[in-house]
Amino acid sequence: MHIDQNISLKPYNTFGIDVNAKFFVSVSSIDDLKYVLTLQDFPNKLILGGGSNILLTKDFDGLVVHINLKGITIISETSQHVIVRANAGENWHEFVLWCLENNFGGIENLSLIPGNVGTAPIQNIGAYGVELKDAFVSCDSMCIQSQAMKTFTKLDCNFGYRNSIFKTEAKGKYVITSVDFKLTKQNHKLNTNYGAITSELQNMGVKSPTIKDVSKVVIAIRESKLPNPKEIGNSGSFFKNPVISKELYVTLQENFRDIPSYPVSENDVKIPAGWLIEKAGFKGKRFNDYGVHKNQALVLVNYGNAKGEDILRLSKLIQKTIKRLFSITIEAEVNIL
């Protein structure tokens, strides 16, 4: 383990923003992590995982701690289920593929989501009718202040829509080191009713889909709509889908008859943020080296050498416009630093 100086964080964030860390260290063991967290010479620390849900707007004048804990282990199993532990530094999509190769079902709908396993519970990643919490059992974490280990159960995590305890009262207090998942070994319960999964399976002529079939379709759909971060810098969905009252929704229908909605409760509905952004005229709009993706209005992109401030300014313009046109506040899903 070595602490480097003046390291560019461009390879460590999917937006591809070129900012520097004054100090940088990559940790690959629990002991290394414990040691680094005790270093009093670096009071200002930034914990960095896969860099897929972060927008860096300036250099970091402190120590960036890159979590590079690797390893996948089967903890226990029965004839029906298996408990799998994945360490925090494992790439999420590669972990999904590993599960598929072992015929472990439950997270196939979450294929191709960027980022690492350790950051997945923080925002309760989700796609195509499935959320991380559906397969989540627990996660082990290290307290940043005391370096004591703590296990968070599903109940402890208080999962919500793109939310968890790690974004609220435990924010900035723990480093997730591993995550345990309960997956099926047979009689997999497929979720194919969301989006275009069913129609795509029909187009492929698949009548009895497997978990691999579902994954392939999800990957194809995502690739058709979302830019590859290795080719165009982005963090996936930049904004959360807002939840509004049915009363406001009915009012909006008077001027926007095609406004889509999904029921959340008796009094609230969820509106696709992508629809709002597209309706406001931002879809495909480009400003020099940054803009809104042409196929998915939820995705803000760095076409080359954009600065984090550029993308942040664009996001604020979108938020302001949505508020003016629809009286709806949309929140950033991405962490801004």
Image (cartoon, rainbow, N blue to C red):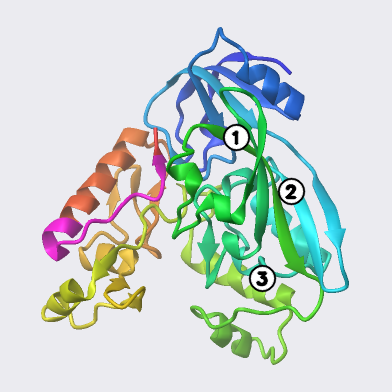
Packing grade of label 1 (10 A; few <14, some 14-19, many >=20) is: many
Residue 179 spot, x, y in % from top left: 68, 48
The amino acid marked with disc number 1 is Val
Q: Is residue 316 above or below residue 241?
A: above
Specify which label sits upstream in the sequence, 2 or 3: 2
The amino acid marked with disc number 2 is Ala
Label 1 SS? strand
| CB within 8 Å, label 1 to label 2 | no
The quarter in which the N terminus is drawn is top right
The quarter in which the C terminus is drawn is top left
Specify which label sits upstream in the sequence, 1 or 2: 2
The answer to whether residue 163 shows anywhere in this view is yes
Occupied quadrant, residue 109:
bottom right
Q: Residue beneath label 1, please?
A: 175
Instruction: Determine which of the numbered discs, if any, sits on residue 215 in the image.
Output: 3
Instruction: Determine which of the numbered discs, if any, sits on residue 86 in the image.
Output: 2
Q: Viewed as shown, does residue 145 lie left or right of 187?
A: left
Packing grade of label 3 (10 A; few <14, some 14-19, many >=20) is: many
| Residue depth check, mark 1 versus mark 2: number of the one nearer the observer | 1
The answer to whether residue 307 shows anywhere in this view is no
Q: Please give the range of residues in magenta.
A: 322-335
Label 2 SS? strand
